[in-house]
Amino acid sequence: MLYGRPKPLTAAQQYLNLRANPISLGQGSLRAGRLTWRYLATPSTLSREYGMRIEFAQGGVPKTYVDAPDLQALAGERPIPHLYSRNPPQLCLYLPRIYEWQPQMRIDQTIVPWSVLWLFYFEEWLLSDEWKGGGMHPGDYNPRRRNAA
């Protein structure tokens, strides 16, 4: 063990944390170092409800998807900003290459609230056509421009 360096959380630990935290209330499955978690998210009291899914393989990074409603149908012809992939829509919540998410972080305390915040900005974008959530898309990352957002 390295002193001063936190140990990565296992998929089982992440699963138990997700089950225990009321903000990630939902259900999931845990098999052979992999978890899938489904929950409902409502970014504001006036918002629609979103069916969310997190997939996590031990040693990897969490992947977050919106299963319902269909985000592209809501967006119409416009390309949705801040997605890692479009089909299915995988939310861009952090830049993996600069380790904004670390394996010792709890998914229920990071990925879940980050996904709700992403949904808040998505709904704002639907109305204004301007992404106000800040951040960079992974393809736009340039280590020489670290302060650019």
Image: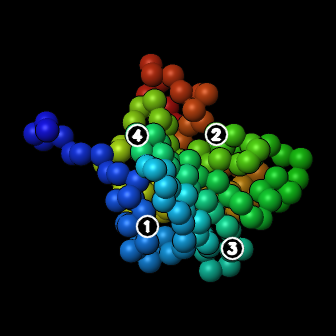
Q: Is the C-beta separation of discs 2 and 3 under 8 Å?
A: no
SS type, badge 4: loop
Q: Is the C-beta separation of discs 2 and 4 under 8 Å?
A: no
Considering only vertical position in the picture, is 139 above or below 108?
A: above
Where residue 87 appears, x then y in whole percent? 76, 44
> In the shown orientation, is residue 32 left or right of residue 90?
left
Disc 3 marks which amino acid? Answer: Glu
Task: Name the residue tied to disc 2.
Answer: 84
Cα–Cα span, label 4 and label 3? 31 Å
Q: Is the C-beta separation of discs 4 and 3 under 8 Å?
A: no
Residue shown at 41%/32% (left/top)?
Answer: 98
Q: Is residue 54 visible?
A: yes
Residue shown at 89%/47% (left/top)?
Answer: 77
Task: Name the residue tied to disc 3.
Answer: 49
SS type, badge 2: strand
User: Of circles 3 and 1, which is in front?
Assistant: 1
Cα–Cα span, label 1 and label 2? 23 Å
Task: Name the residue tied to disc 1.
Answer: 18
Residue shown at 37%/66% (left/top)?
Answer: 17
Q: Is the C-beta separation of discs 3 and 1 under 8 Å?
A: no
First along the sequence among labels 4 and 1? 1
Cα–Cα span, label 2 and label 4? 19 Å
Residue shown at 68%/68% (left/top)?
Answer: 50
